[in-house]
Image (spheres, grey):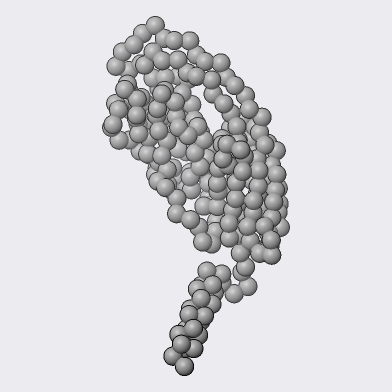
């Protein structure tokens, strides 16, 4: 009898856990996809003739532009259920580049800009609504900025003119960045039709619709 009661309790707690994760009338579906974007190699910049405390004198290597510089997001799903925790938004300065080249954040987030180079950087943006200038700071010094206006923010360095990156400030937390192969996944989405958008700094925005069901994963291919 005791064994039966223990088994029954385990079953009831399992059912309760499922109900808490998936509210009544809201089953969880999965959206899998692949992004296809042409890669463009940029020629390296010539070496500078001057090296000093502010400038590096380093040359840029060829920059590969691919699906890892695309942001895929669901504009109409402001608070997705069962959202996995995200790391703190960070855009590093390393080898005279911004890493990552494209960063997505939810409006209101604070982004850190650590300097990992052995020379000074001065991170700034002149985009209306999110203008900022962090001033010149050396390796190991901390600098950050909040982003309170949705849209595209172009990030530059006042010292190194070829340094350029993008921050896409979104109204939703339902976003992801594909891996180098272009693959991405949105797990545990509510059943129904969802608007899907993909943004790339040079190719612009792609939009479409998908029907998600908990019965089987939904697949989509985005060519941007």
Left/right of residue 53 with respect to residue 91 in the rendered view:
left
Provide residue 131's location: percent of width, then percent of height: 43, 34
Quadrant of image for the C terminus: top right
Furthest-bottom residue in this view: 1
- Labels in figure, total: 0
Left/right of residue 204 with respect to residue 55 in the rendered view:
right
Provide residue 58's location: percent of width, then percent of height: 41, 15
In the foreground, 220 or 151: 220
Provide residue 36's location: percent of width, then percent of height: 67, 37
- Residue drawn at the location 32% of the way across and 21% of the way down: 119
- Residue drawn at the location 60% of the way across and 32% of the way down: 66
| One can see residue 30 in this view | yes
- Residue drawn at the location 49% of the way across and 83% of the way down: 7
Quadrant of the image occupied by residue 71: top right
> Compared to 138, does 191 lie above or below?
below
- Residue drawn at the location 52% of the way across and 80% of the way down: 11
Provide residue 146's location: percent of width, then percent of height: 40, 42
> Compared to 221, does 101 lie above or below?
above
| One can see residue 71 in this view | no
């Amino acid at each position: 009898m005791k064994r039966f009661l223990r088994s029954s309790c385990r079953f009831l707690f399992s059912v309760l856990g499922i109900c808490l994760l998936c509210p009544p009338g809201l089953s969880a579906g999965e959206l899998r996809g692949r992004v296809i974007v042409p890669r463009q190699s940029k020629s390296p910049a010539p070496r500078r003739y001057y090296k000093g405390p502010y400038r590096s004198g380093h040359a840029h290597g060829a920059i590969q532009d691919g699906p890892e510089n695309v942001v895929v997001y669901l504009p109409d799903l402001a608070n997705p259920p069962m959202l996995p925790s995200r790391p703190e938004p960070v855009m590093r300065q390393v080898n005279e580049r911004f890493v990552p080249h494209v960063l997505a954040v939810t409006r209101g987030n604070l982004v850190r800009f650590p300097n990992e180079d052995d020379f000074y950087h001065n991170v700034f943006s002149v985009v209306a609504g999110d203008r900022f200038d962090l001033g010149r700071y050396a390796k190991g010094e901390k600098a950050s900025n909040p982003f309170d206006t949705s849209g595209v923010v172009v990030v530059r360095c006042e010292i190194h003119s070829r340094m350029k990156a993008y921050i896409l400030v979104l109204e939703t937390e339902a976003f992801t960045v594909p891996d180098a192969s272009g693959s991405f996944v949105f797990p545990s989405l509510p059943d129904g039709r969802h608007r899907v958008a993909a943004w790339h700094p040079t190719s612009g925005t792609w939009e479409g619709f998908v029907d998600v069901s908990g019965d089987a994963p939904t697949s989509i291919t985005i060519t941007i």
